[in-house]
Image: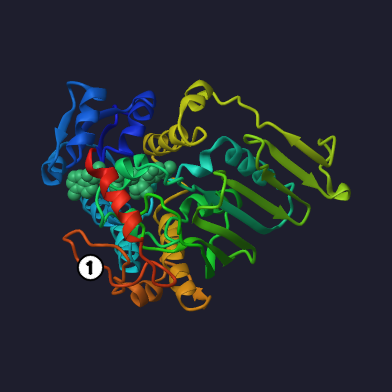
Amino acid sequence: MKTIKMGIFGCNRGMNFANHIMMNNAEIVAVCDKDERWLNKAKEKLGDGVAYYSDFEEFFKHDMDAVLLANYFNEHAPFAIRFLEKGVHVLSECTPAGTMAECVELVEAAEKSTATYMICENYPFMTFNREITRICETGTLGKFMFAEGEYNHPGHGKDASFSRTYIPYEKHWRNYLPATYYCTHALAPLMYATGATPKRVTAFPIWAPPTEKIVCSKHSGDRTAIITTLNDDDSVFRFTGCAAFGHEENSYRVCGTKGQVENLRGTGGKISLNYSWWDKPENVENNSTVYEPEKNDPDQELIDKAGHGGGDFVVMREFLNALRENRRPKMDVYFATVMSAVAILSHRSLMEGGMPYDVPDFRKQEDRDKWREDRSTPFYGYNGEEPTIPCSSKPWHPSEEQLKAYFEGIKNR
Ligand SMILES: NC(=O)c1ccc[n+]([C@@H]2O[C@H](COP(=O)([O-])OP(=O)(O)OC[C@H]3O[C@@H](n4cnc5c(N)ncnc54)[C@H](O)[C@@H]3O)[C@@H](O)[C@H]2O)c1
């Protein structure tokens, strides 16, 4: 296949992938960001031979085979749809769709398109999660019954460095992000490893608003939510949105009828694998082991250098290989939009005291029709439209002191 020509839309997160695109033998032909700060950083890194755009419409006209969408969290679907209609392959950062209506529109656009859609979920490809998936695929754990996932990313708030880089203005999506909406990093590894798909969801918030004197501009007092899904194989998942428990660490566990596997907290990525002694596979010496996952991938050196436990390299490799091999990636539009639906409906659930919601099957016309007009959103819109639903389980806003520290902090970006 000819060299894949790729564009990058959104150069903050987007530029994290520049090396991985090139190392996977694709070419970056154009990038776009309306924020000069990020566009200039892209120019510094990529130099001549790449087209730089601050205007999306101009970028959209550029000839490319594939695009990485790393624009605002809640605005991926409308851009993905336009590229799919143009026949350009899409690798979209999370979340795939910001509303239930967009989930439907995205599925329908992907079905009509000749191009491939994949969600850029890197967490299933972290080294320990690849090992958990490998173990699950051996079948030795028996029938999957339960899995849990924690994406835990607290911010210290003692200085404004995070806000300066990631929350450049007050109405930014990060300030209005409900506790459940960023659940893909906790959920995708479970779906990827077990093959199960959520069918029903319920959630509770964990209310712990920051009251200290810190830099804070978030309009939610929920530090995370605990989301539970009943799945199509009768298993249950329990996972977080973006959690802010003390001590940053991500963890995952899958339990089957014969054994369980997890990455152990505090060990830098070791795996704990345990079988019932009577169900231990013959080729396994001990029924209970803790070990480092083997690092024997042909691209191991590049994986070791990549962000998010190697996931950033592997997710790009998976996307580009799927295009080259003309195959459907596992994390396709259905996989992606189920995660967005879980994110959105679990927020509704926690606003209603844990009311369960059926997760739509977007392959079915009746499920699409049920949700295609639902545009409720906790975020400010593309043209400054006001949010239509609250982002917090109880009303909460940063204190004057916290907001002042935020505005002071982002002044000199
Ligand atoms: N998978 C991961 O590990 C991971 C890590 C970080 C971020 N992300 C995701 O990547 C996405 C981007 O994250 P971020 O931290 O860079 O967010 P961000 O809000 O800082 O960046 C979005 C960028 O897109 C640009 N942009 C948005 N709309 C535009 C338009 N119409 N025209 C031109 N430029 C436009 C903005 O100027 C901004 O620089 C988010 O969806 C986030 O959730 C994923």
* Position of 277 relative to 130 (above/below): below
| In the displayed structure image, the side of residue 24 where residue 284 appears, left or right | right
Q: x, y (%) of residue 270?
A: 67, 36
Give residue 162's quadrant in the image.
top left
Q: x, y (%) of residue 247?
A: 57, 45
- What type is the residue that disc 1 sits on? Glu
Q: Which residue lies furthest to the right in this view?
A: 278
Q: Nearer the viewer, residue 174 or 402?
A: 402
Q: x, y (%) of residue 219?
A: 36, 62
Task: Specify the quadrant that holds the N terminus.
Answer: top left
Mark 1 lies on residue: 386
Task: Specify the quadrant that holds the C terminus.
Answer: top left
Local crowd size for mark 1, using a 10 Å CA cut-off: few (<14), some (14–19), many (≥20): few
Quadrant containing ligand 1: top left
Q: x, y (%) of residue 257?
A: 76, 57
Give residue 273's quadrant in the image.
top right
How is the model colour-coded?
rainbow
| In the displayed structure image, the side of residue 198 where residue 320 appears, left or right | left
Q: State whether label 1 is within 8 Å of ligand 1.
A: no
Q: What residue do we see at 54% from left, 61% from top?
A: 197
Q: Which of 66 and 386 is in front in this view?
A: 386
Q: What residue do we see at 62% from left, 34% from top?
A: 268
Q: What residue do we see at 49% from left, 49% from top?
A: 185
| In the displayed structure image, the side of residue 273 where residue 120 appears, left or right | left
* Residue 158 showing in the rendered view: yes
Q: Nearer the viewer, residue 172 or 65?
A: 172
* Residue 93 showing in the rendered view: no
| Label 1 element class | loop
Q: What residue do we see at 83% from left, 44% from top?
A: 280
Q: How many labels does the image show?
A: 1
